[in-house]
Image (cartoon, coloured by chain):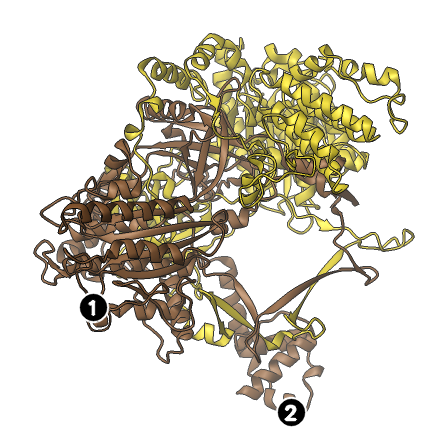
Chain colours: A yellow, B brown
Amino acid sequence: MFLLLARGEELQALIASFRNPSLLFHSDTGPKLGSALPSHARWSSIGVQINLIYNKNDEVGVVLFGTEGTDNELTREVGGYEHVLVLCESKVVDGDILDAVQRLPRGTVPGDFIDAIVVGMDMMIKKFGVTNKGKKRICLITSAREPIKEPYEGTKEDQIDTIASQMNAHGMKLESIVVRELASNANKNIMDENDHLLSRFSKKAGARVVYVEDPTSLLGAFRTRNISPVTIFRGDLELSPRVKIKVWVYKKTSEEKFPTLKKYSDKAPSTDKFATHEIKVDYEYKMADDTVKVVPPEQRIKGYRYGPQVVPISSAELEAIKFKPEKSVKLLGFTSVSNILRHYYMKDVNIFIAEPGNKEATLAVSALVRAMKKMNKVAILRCVWRQGQGNVVVGVLTPNESNQENIPDSFYFNVLPFAEDVREFQFRSFSGLPASCQPNQQQQEASDKLVMMLDLAQPEKSEDLRPDFTPNPVLERFHHVLELKSKKPDSDIPSLDKTLKRIIEPDSKILLQNRALIDEFCKLFDVKENPKIKKSTRRLWTKTSSDGEGESAQGGLNDHGVPSFNSEGKPIVSQIGDKTPAEDFEAMMARRDGVEWVNKAMKDMKSFIYDLVENSYEGDAYSKALDCLIALRKGCIVEQEPKQFNDFLRQLCKFCREKDLASFCKFLVSKQIMLITKAEAIDSDATEEDAINFLVKTEPTT
Amino acid sequence: MEEDLDDLFRDDDEDPESEFNQDREYSKEMVVFLVDASPPMFAALDDGGDQHEESHFHVALDCISQSLKTRIIGRSNDEVAICFFNTREKKNLQDLNGVFVFNVAEREHLDRPTARLIKEFDCIEESFMHSIGSVHGIMAGSRENSLYNALWVGQALLRKGSSKTTDKRMLIFTNEDDPFGSIKGAAKTDMIRTTLQRAKDAQELGISIELLPLSRPDEEFNLSILYADLLGLEGEDIAQYIPSVGEKLEDMKGQLRKRMFKKRKIRRITFSIVNGISIELNTYALIRPTVPGSITWLDSVTNLPLKAERSFICADTGALMQEPPKRFYPYKGKNIMFTTEELSKIKRVSTGHLHLLGFKPLSCLKDYHNLRPATFVYPSDEEIVGSTCIFIALYRSMLRLERRFALAFYGSSSQPHMVALVAQDEVTDSSGQLEPPGMHMIYLPYSDDIRHVEELHMDTNVATPRASDDQIGKATALMKRIDLKDFSVCQFANPALQRHYAVLQALALDEDEMPEVSDETLPDEQGMARPGVVNALEEFKISVYGENYDYEASTKAESDAAKKRKAAAETAAMECAYYDWAELCEGGKLNGLTVVELKYYLNAHNLPVTGKKEVLINRIMNHIRKV
C-alpha cells in the first residue's frame, strides 16, 4: 500500500502477503475468530481510515504477493515478478481503496517479499521520482516463512544492498511487520535466513523490523500516522558553564486525544449545498448585577484568587513581575536510580539525542549513557526549553542504550514534581493492620501462584500487551464507527471487537487453562459485602453527592435524622433501599404527593437492577434482581407504561450479553420473564408472541 | 428511556482536566487549631547543637503557618480558626477564661484564610507575651479548666455548616500529657470527667478531635494518661498514634506537617481480580502538578467579577441557538453525525473500574511508558470485606516474585487506559512515613502515543559512533564527583509558583515592594567550581572532544534552511541599499515596488516577510517611522 499527499506529501506503501490464513493468526483459534482473513482485512481498513482522518492528501497503494494471479508493470516490462499483484495503484485514499482492502483475496502460492518490495519501489519511483524524500514509506506485512528465490546474479545479500541503496537514494523508508505465531511448524532455516535478510535492510536502509505474535499487536505495530516530529529544544546540555553537549529534544510519548467533534447546526436550509453546519460559540462578559451591559474586552482585567480575595493584575503588570528564566538546559548533578521512584514521573516523556551529524556530541552522549547504565545513576536537569517560558522544569535523565548499531544512544527525560506538587498523606503500614486483614500462609501461596500464572512476559514468548504494540481501543472503535456510519448513517455502535477485547479483559484462554488454580484462589479468599453498611452501589453508576449517600442509607430519614411519616403512619419512602427494594419501589410508586415520584421510582429501580446484575458474583444476586424486575413489570402495567419496561428489558439483555453476563438472560428465560404485551397494556409494541420469544430468540447464536 | 439508560452509563463526575490538574472540590474542611500556650510550651529546646533556640510553641506556630499558606493556595475554601489556650487574656464568644481566639480584620473567627491573617500570624510570636500572655490555666485550688474551655470554644466555632458536607476537625498542639497532674482528689476526677464528656459531645456532633503531641526531648508523650480517652483511641490505634520521640526538631516538624492534612480520596473503585472476585480500592492523588489558580475576569473600572455568558451561533445563518444535541466529524467528504450518547458509548469500552490483565516483571516497564502523574491506590474494607487481605497478598507476591507489576485496564469513562500497578514498599525514616505502602497506578501509553524518534536520524550504512571505554571511564569519574547523595524528588519549590503567590500576597496587602523569591533550581555553582569537579569535567571534555576543540564550529552542518536564510539576508542587505526607502515611503511610492523588492527591506531589517503586499508595505512604513 502506498500513500502520498500533496502538501505534506507523504508516501507509504504496504505490501501484504496473504497466502496462508494461519499466517496472521493462530490457526487453532481460527474458528473462534471466524475466518481470519476478513478480520485482518478490517485492520488494514482501519489503518487506511486513520490515514484518511489525519492526512486527507495521503496516497496509498496496495500490493499483494503470494497471490495466484500476477499483475504488475515490471512483469509486463521485464518479466519475472510472478505472484505479485498490484491491488490498487497509488492514489489518494478513498472509499474504493477501503473496499478493495476489505475484500483482500487470499494468497495461495509462496510469496517472495523481495519481489514485492521491488514492485512497490518501482511504482513509487515511477510516480514520484526523487521527490518527496523521506515521505515515502513501504510497509511490509509478512510472515517471512517462505523461501526467497535465488537472484539471477549475485547473492541475496547483494540484491538487498542494491535495493537498500536505491531506497536511500529515493528517500524511502521500509517498515516490516513480521507476524508469526509461536510453535509454528515452518521451516526454521528459511525463517532464519529471511530474518537475516530483513535485518540487513534495517542496517543498510534504516528499515524498521517488528515481530508480533497476535492480531492485537499487529494492529498496534501497524503505524499509520507518521507525524513529522518537531524538536522542543535545540541547544546545549550544560554539564557546567564550560562543558556542553549539543542536543536536540523531542517528545517520545504524547497522548493521542479523542478527536474533537464540531457542534452541528441544523439551521441551514437543506438546499444549501455549501452550508458548513458549524456552530460558533461566543462568550460575552457582563456585570454580575447587570445582565444587559456587555463589558468590552479592553475593559476586562484578569483576577487571580488568593484566599477569598481576587487580586486584579493587568497583563502588562503580570509581564513585568513574572518569573522569567533564561532558555537553558543545565545539569544539577547525578544521583542513584534508587532515589527516583517510578511513580514520580509526572508527564509525557521527552527524548534527548545528540545533535545529528555531530560526532563529538554523539560520543559525549554515548559515554554518559553507558556510564550511567553501568553505575546505576541518573542525571537531574533543570530545563527551560524556550526563551520566555514562564516556568522551569526539573526532571530526570535516564539512559537509553541503543542495541542497534546504526541508532545512536540517547536519554529519556521525565519531569519530576516540585515540593508543592506532593501531598504527604499518611497510610497505615500493612503489618500494623488487624489480623483479619493479613493473608495467612495458604492464601499467600495461592496469591503467589496467581501472580506467576498470569504472567504476560513468559521468557519463551514475546511480551504480551506491550504498550508499544497495543492500540488505543477507543480510537480504533471511533474510526470503525465512522466507517460504518459513512455507509449507513444510523448504524448502531458495535460492541468492541474481539481483537481489542484482549486489551480490556484478561485472556480467557489462560483463565480456562488454570481453572483449578483460580478456583482455589477464590475459595481461599472470602470477599463479601459489608453487612453493617448499606452498600451505596449507585456510586458505581452515577454521581452520588455526599448528601445523596446519607439519604440513601434508609428510606425516609430527613435532614434531622428523624424518620418522617405520612398521614397513614407509614414511613415515606423516597429512595430504593437495599433491604427491601421491591417494597420501596411499590411505596414510591404509590406516593401521591407528586407525579415525579413514579418516574423517579422507575428510574431508580432500573439503575438498581443494573447494579445488582453487574455486581453479582456467580449469579448470587440474580434472584433479587428477578424480584425487582417483577415488581417493575407490575408497576409499569399499573401505570400503563409498557415502553418503559420493554425498552429496559431489551437494553438489559443487550447489556448482559455484551458484558459476559448472558447467564442472567438464561436465568430470565427459565423464570419466564417476558415483555409487556398489548393485552396487558394497550400502548405496548410487543405482541404475545414477541413477548415470549424475545429472550429466546435473542440468545447469542454462537 | 434511551436517555435514562445512557445517563446511567455516563460517569459525569469525571473530567480529566480537573482530576489531573487540581484537587476537585470535595467537601470542604473546617479546622480549629487549639494551641497550648502554657509556660512549658515556651521552654527553649536544644536542637541538636544548633545555636538558635526554639520552643514547642514556635514549632506549632511554624506548622500552622505552613498549613495556612498551603491552604490559601490549594484549598482556599477551607475555613480555619486559631485558638490559644492557657492564656492570660481571653477573647472568645462565650467569654471563657484562658482561651484566646486569634483573628484579623475583615474576617470571622472561623473563616477562609486571608493574606492578612497569614501575615499577622507570622509575627504573632514577638508580641505574644505582651498582648496575649501565657499562664498555667489549670491550677490546684482553682476551678478553671482551660482545656475544657478550649474544647468548648472550638466546638462553638465549628457550629456552622452541615457536618455532611464539611469535615470538621480540632487539632490540639500541646506538650503536656497530663494537664490535670497538679490537681488531686475528687476535683481531679471531676475535671477529667467533664473534659472527657465535652470531647465526647463534640465528637458526637461530627467533629473529630486530633492531637499533635510535642514530645519533650527527655520523655515520651504519654497518651494513656488522658488523651487516649479524650480522642477515643483503643488498643492498636494507640500504637499507631504515638509519635516517635522527637530527637530532632526538624523530624518533629515533619511529622506534624504530614498529619495536618487529612487525606482525601479521589474516588472509590472496584478492582476485579479473577472470576468475578472484586475488591474495593480507594484512589488518592499524591502527586499532581500545582498550577496558579484559575483566572476570574474582572471589570477594570470597578474590580468586580464579571460573569461569562455563552451563546451558540449558527455559522450559516447567524441564528442564535440552544446547545445542539449532535456533533459531527467530516469524513470522506461527508459530515458524520454523532449524538452525545453515542460518543459516550464509544468511549465506554469497559464497564466497572479496574480489570486485572496479568503480571509482568518490572523490567518491562520502560522509562518512556508514562503519560501523566500516577495515582495511588490503597485497599478499603468499607464496602467489600476482605479487600485488604487480597490486596496485601497480591502486593506481597508482587514485591517478592522478581519484582513484578500488575497490568490492568482502568475503564474510567473519560480516559480508559492500560495501567501498571506498581507495588511500593513502605519507606520510613525518623521524620515519619516517606513512602506509604500500597500500589501506584501508572498510566501507560498506547502504540498511538509512542513516537519513534530514535529512528529518525538513523545512520545508514555506517555504524554510529560509540563511546570508548576510556570515555566511559571519564564519564564514570565525573558522575562520582557530581553525586547528589541525598537527592529527594521534591526538594525544590517551584520558583514560578512561589513568585506568583508572593506577588499575589503583596498585591493583596497593598504592599509597594515586590518580594524577591530565590530560585532553588539553579545549579550549585560553588560546588561545580570545586577543583575536583572542574578537573573531572575537564578530563571528560578532553577525552570526548580532544584538545583545542572549537565547540561552536563543531556545529558542522548548519541546516540548509539556516544557510538559505543567511544568504537571503546578505543579498537583501545589498539590494536594499539601492533604494531610498525614506523617500519612497514619504512619497507613497512603496506601492510601486514589487513584493520581491519589498522583501529586500524586510529581510535586511530582520522583519517578518509574511503577509500580503499591503501588510508588507504597512510593516515597512511603521519601521521607517520608528527609525
Q: Is residue A9 above or below residue B378?
A: below
Q: Chain of mark 1?
A: B
* Placement of B74 over or under A631, stated as above or below: below
| Quadrant of the drawing holding the N terminus of chain A | top right
In the visual, does A565 lie left or right of A68? left
Percent coordinates x, y for residue B39 in the rendering? 15, 61
In this rendering, position of residue B453 left or right of residue A291? left
What is the quadrant of the C terminus of chain A in the image?
A: top right
Q: Nearer the viewer, residue A231 or B352?
A: B352
Query: Which dot, 1 or 2, sits closer to the camera?
Result: 1
Q: How many marks?
A: 2
Please give the residue where the numbered disc 1 appears in the rendered image. B133
In this rendering, does residue A81 appear at all? no
- Whether residues under marks 1 and 2 lie with C-beta atoms below 8 angstroms apart, the answer is no
Q: Are marks 1 and 2 on the same chain?
A: yes
Up/down of A252 relative to A641, above or below: below
**Residue ID at (52%, 17%):** B275
The picture places residue A352, in percent across and down from the top left corner, at 40, 48
Residue annotated with mark 2: B586
Question: How many angstroms separate mark 1 from mark 2 (CA)?
Answer: 79 Å
